[in-house]
């Protein structure tokens, strides 16, 4: 499962030198382990992403993408990922081409889109190809209704739901300031 988005904390070189001077060898590893903070960032990102996905209000949406999102905190990063194959294309946009067939079937009825019913789910002989104004369609032979548009590829505009926002930056600043304050209290506790 490839991450959809990564957030890494990399202090500037000046900050790194200052931290090296402050830190003893024993305390250094604990200070540079941001797993707790990255877990908080991951939880915040999931909540924000789910809110953004819900706000889209699509008639077709079932909430599968929002439910599939997970986060994985590491020492200096957090990744957000999904097992759904369309998660990245929704985030970044791009061109979708069929893998097994020559054409993609775009449902023309809302009930087919909602139920994820594709041509392969129909009984044999129930669908027939029709060309109208140079476009290829599948029609239901029983009702004579057009049910799918067939296309070679579809370009999807990115609709990011994982966003690096001002609110996220403020959260990161707050978490890092708390981490630094806790660390400094630990160092100077022995001097008081």
Image (tube, grey):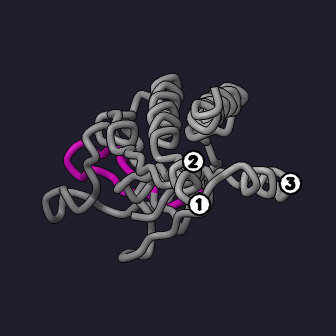
Q: CA distance from mark 3 to mark 2?
A: 17 Å
Q: Residues within 10 Å of mark 1 (few under 14, many from 20)?
A: few
Q: Position of residue 103 (x, y in %)?
A: 45, 69
Query: Does the stretch in magenta take in 33?
Result: no
Looking at the image, is mark 3 or mark 2 earlier in the sequence?
A: 3
Q: Disc 2 designates what residue? A: 31
Residue reaching furthest to the front:
191
Tell me which residue sits at (45%, 40%) in the image: 36
Tell me which residue sits at (58%, 30%) in the image: 189
Can residue 115 be seen in this snapshot? yes
Looking at the image, is mark 1 or mark 3 earlier in the sequence?
A: 3
Q: Residues within 10 Å of mark 3 (few under 14, many from 20)?
A: few
Q: Which quadrant of the figure contains the C terminus?
A: top right
Q: Disc 1 designates what residue? A: 25
Q: Nearer the viewer, residue 37 or 41?
A: 37
Residue 14 is labelled as 3
Verify CB contact (< 8 Å) between mark 1 and mark 3: no
Q: Position of residue 179 (x, y in %)?
A: 59, 35
Which image quarter: residue 186? top right
- The secondary structure that dominates the magenta segment is strand
Q: Position of residue 23 (x, y in %)?
A: 66, 52
Verify CB contact (< 8 Å) between mark 3 and mark 2: no
């Amino acid at each position: 499962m490839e991450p959809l988005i990564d957030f890494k904390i990399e202090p500037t070189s000046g900050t790194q030198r200052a931290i090296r001077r402050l830190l003893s060898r024993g305390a250094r590893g604990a200070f540079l382990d941001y797993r707790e903070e990255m877990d908080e960032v991951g939880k915040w990102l999931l909540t924000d992403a789910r809110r953004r996905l819900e706000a889209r209000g699509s008639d077709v949406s079932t909430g599968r993408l929002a439910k599939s999102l997970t986060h994985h905190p590491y020492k200096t990063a957090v990744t957000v990922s999904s097992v759904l194959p369309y998660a990245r294309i929704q985030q970044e946009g791009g061109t979708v081409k069929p893998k097994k067939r020559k054409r993609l079937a775009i449902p023309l009825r809302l009930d087919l889109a909602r139920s994820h019913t594709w041509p392969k789910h129909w009984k044999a002989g129930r669908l027939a190809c029709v060309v109208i104004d140079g476009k290829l369609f599948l029609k239901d032979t029983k009702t004579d209704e057009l049910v799918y548009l067939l296309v070679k590829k579809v370009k999807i505009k990115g609709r990011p739901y994982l966003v690096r926002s001002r609110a996220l930056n403020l959260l990161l600043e707050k978490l890092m300031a708390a981490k630094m304050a806790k660390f400094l209290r630990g160092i100077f506790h022995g001097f008081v």
